[in-house]
Image: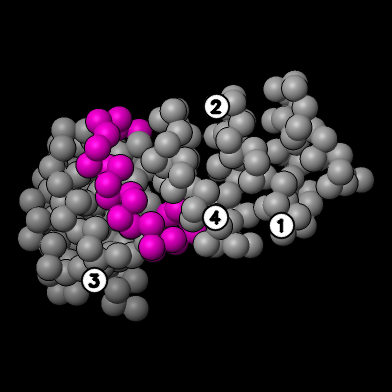
Amino acid sequence: MTTAAAVQAALASQDLGDRLSGINQLRQLPPDVAFELIQPVIHDPNPRVRYAAVSQLSSLGNCNLDKAQALLCDRLHNDGEVDVKAAAADAIGALKLSEAFADLASVYSNTSEWLLQFSIVAALGELGNPAATPLLLAALDTDQELLKLAAIGSLGELGDRAILPVLASYIDYPDWQVRHRLAIALGQIGGAQADSLLHQLSQDSSSTVAETATTLLAMQSA
């Protein structure tokens, strides 16, 4: 049986493997206990350990959202590894920490790392803050395909019908994955204009896009 004392000892070990194992064992403890034990590990000298710890906060952070936000925003701004920063953005989105919107927007505007930008754009959709729309539209206009996908997805989650004319310009986008994500976003947004665009996508050259659009239209009319 895994005990808090055993996990704490593993997390304090000088051995990297022990610390990584300790983070995995946290899942076997009550969430409130695991949340207390994981906090010091957020600042571990090894980036793999920090990444694993930050990633687990996406669930453990529910024990204390204010403390989780402080920890995640600190890593978002100050960690030396891009993947740890990205994991912090992912966790902020998963926990729907809406008060961290300004932190996400600030970091986005000050980084050229696409992985971090991608995680921030995806998180903004989960937060559901309409103030994110200008940033998402800017991300949509980049050359990075994954950012386009994430931006369309987040705009769909926000559900603002005012941006439908912008999304309509992607109806014939060369990459079928972008058109597929567009169909899903249109289904989330809904309304007559979105349905009209879905009708166009139901005739798409990609069977995946066409089937998704057709299914979404059927769900709208059900």
Q: Which residue is mark 4?
A: 68
Q: Is residue 5 visible?
A: yes
The residue at 59%/26% (across/down) is: 45
Q: Which residues are magenta?
A: 92-115
The residue at 84%/47% (across/down) is: 4
Q: Where's residue 154, x and y in %?
A: 29, 55
Q: Which residue is mark 2?
A: 47
Q: Which residue is mark 3?
A: 190
The residue at 72%/30% (across/down) is: 19
Q: Which mark is residue 31?
A: 1
Label 2 amino acid?
Pro
Label 4 amino acid?
Ala
Q: Earlier in the sequence, mark 2 or mark 1?
A: 1
- Observer-nearest residue: 208 or 112? 112
Q: Where's residue 18, x and y in %?
A: 76, 27
Q: Earlier in the sequence, mark 1 or mark 4?
A: 1
